[in-house]
Amino acid sequence: MRNGGESGARRALAEKVAEYIDLHFSEKITLAALREAFHFNENYISYTFKEFTGTGVNCYITKKRMEKACALLNGTALSVKEVAEATGYADALYFERVFRKYAGVPPTEYRRRGENPSVFDAFTRKFYR
């Protein structure tokens, strides 16, 4: 059985990693970058994050990027390429593929409809099966 202090420290790490991703989602975030930022082994960060958030690091990053993309598509006149770049995707075509998996429609169609995603967690489960 783990002691409460260790569990609390692991939870704190997961929360700090989530905060870091929330602030830096538009940058290239890798487990190696998280290792450098938090000085823990990549596997430890990955396992701890999933243990306390219920989702993997990459899935969480994608979720944050898609949330921001939806907001930008509905709230700005930025082009799809500009939205892709603002959300951390250097390749607009790849962004469009990921977005279509997330929202069920291409970014231009999403913007035209003025939709809002109903449940981000449903995307998380569907996208990474």
Image (cartoon, rainbow, N blue to C red):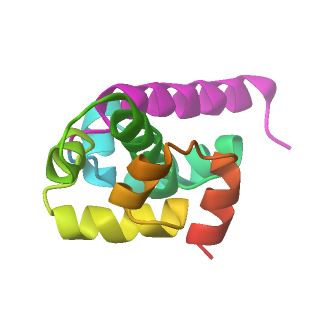
Q: Dividing the picture into quarters, in which one does residue 4 lie?
A: top right
Residue ID at (86%, 44%)? 1
| Residue 20 in the figure: left or right of residue 129 | left
Give the percent coordinates (x, y) of residue 79: 18, 46
Q: Which quarter of the rendered picture does the C terminus lie within?
A: bottom right
Image mark count:
0
In the rendered view, would you say 127 is above or below 75? below
Residue beneath the point at 66% across and 42% down: 53
**Image vertical order of residue 13 relative to residue 54, above or below:** above
Q: Main secondary structure of the magenta part?
A: helix
Return the x and y of residue 77 as percentages of the image width and height. Answer: 23, 34
Q: Position of residue 29 (x, y in %)?
A: 27, 46
Q: Which residues are magenta?
A: 1-27
Q: Is residue 101 visible?
A: yes
User: Looking at this rendering, what residue extends furthest in the bottom direction?
Assistant: 129
Query: Residue 19: x percent and y percent?
Result: 46, 25
Q: To which quarter of the image does residue 116 belong?
A: top right
Instruction: Decide which of 113, 116 is in the foreground and name it.
Output: 113
The answer to whether residue 40 of the structure is visible from this angle is no
Q: Is residue 4 above or below residue 55?
A: above
Q: Residue at x 29, y 32 (%)?
A: 24
Residue 36 vs 123, above or below: the answer is above
